[in-house]
Amino acid sequence: MLTPGEWRVLNEIRTGATNAEIAVRLGLSLATIKFHVRNIRAKLELDEREQLIAWQPEEAPARTGARRVLAPLGLLLGFWKPAIGVAAVTVVGGAAIAAGVFAYTIANEGEAAPPGSPQELATATATPTDTPSATATEEEATEEAADWNTPSVTFWGEVPEEQQAELRQRVADVVRFYDERFGVRVPDLSIHIAADDEAWAAALGGPVEPVAEIHKATYRNGAIFIHATRTFDWIERFYFEAFQEQAAEGRDLGPEWLGEGAAMYAAHLFRHWRGEKLLADASALWRWAASYDDTPLQALEAWSPTAAELTGVETAATATLAAEWLVSRAGEAALVAYYEALPTSESWQESFGHTFGLSPGDAYEGIEAHRAAVLVVRRTVTGGIRGPDDEPVDATRLFVYAVRVDGSGSEGVTVAMDGRFTVRPPDSTYRLKVTKFCPPDSSVDLGWYEEESGFTTDGSEATRIVVDGSDVSGIAIRLPGTVEELAEGCEA
């Protein structure tokens, strides 16, 4: 049941050493030692340090039903019914919310989970072996909150109270999901949620790195910072990244694509469990996005998460696709076991081979074959947009869409400032449409590409472009006037 890191800590406990002494001996932080001790106690169901000292593997206690925490490679799930109070919350610059704790009431009723609930979704890949039973009093709830390493949540700016409650619930679900699904908990984690751009800058307390500015989300030094408009995707993802960092205990985490892909995949598992998006639908989405990225996976081995995110969702989708392939071979719990094995491995390659059952080289070969089998092949349609008399136009917020003639969809791309564009659609027949984006959330169709004149406002006159096994180039779109004239009323 115990990971190699937990065994090392347990052996030190048996010498009578304190947590602080163990941290010095093993060269780890005190927070990491406390993290391991809490996991050991939960897995062995022993509360006293003297019991840990006396415990032997052959004397493992019988399950009492008080709590059930999974071994790192376990896939079984229990049915836990949470009665959730409010998380400990600080509000900066907004309405104060009374501090509280997470209280967990586990009912031993034995009925099936309701259709569509997180429990019902989770049991698609799990079978419960016991049903814990307990009732948490207010005093016990306080103790339970500390044991669960509930992240502190700080709101910056005027975040509506209703949204605060939703976000506290999401944090509670994230903690619960990772603990039940993987036996993973992240201690000493803080989450900062900003209401607007001003509060976002204040929360970060300094210059904002480009990737954080783009995504309005970042993880640094044991803290998650998120803009309130972007919380849906990031809390569960950064929680797993925080686990990766703590589990590795300062060792090389290995390929950046694996770190990014494992966190993304785990986040999608959470959303499936919560009933927000089925894993199959998420898989279809990242396969679609990954089809735009033909970078060999091995080239992303040393790429940093910042650089990866700056390339857009395509590279992150490629990483997630690779993680999906590894899960198909070794199971989802292997994504956790890999990082837990790093502290006792000579290298990340050794941990990789031990966890996934193949060498990195064999993995790259298998993943590339998988990509070739599941990703759609895309061609390139390239060209440029010019104004009257072949003069440059203001291409700010201009988009070109390759619209399928059969009405089954389109592929779009932002036009570069010099008017050039490259659309990457799969084989089909298309018409090219030029669109102007109008802030904050609308757009105006300017017209269509017509080969002879270069432009038409009548879609039925648009030239049909056949993409069939090869690229198309030399498309020349000539606007009959300025963008402002064609998109009259856009700014208003």
Image (cartoon, helix red, strand yellow):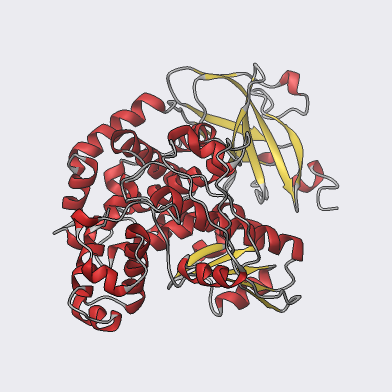
In the displayed structure, does residue 7 sit left or right of residue 125? left
Q: Position of residue 242 (x, y in %)?
A: 41, 63
Residue at image position (84%, 45%) is 488
Instruction: Compare residues 142 and 331 and report the one nearer the observer.
Output: 142
Q: Position of residue 70 (x, y in %)?
A: 37, 50
In the figure, 300 relative to 378: above or below?
below
Q: Position of residue 138 (x, y in %)?
A: 62, 70
Residue 338 visible (yes or no): yes
The number of callouts visible is: 0
Residue 388 visible (yes or no): no
Residue at image position (44%, 39%) is 128
In the figure, 408 relative to 249: above or below?
above
In the figure, 383 relative to 40: above or below?
above
In the figure, 209 relative to 19: above or below?
above
Q: Position of residue 176 (x, y in %)?
A: 51, 55
Q: Quadrant of residue 205?
A: bottom right
Q: Residue placed farthest to the left in the image? A: 346
In the displayed structure, does residue 103 sit left or right of residue 442? left
Residue at image position (48%, 32%) is 124
Instruction: Compare residues 115 and 231 and report the one nearer the observer.
Output: 115
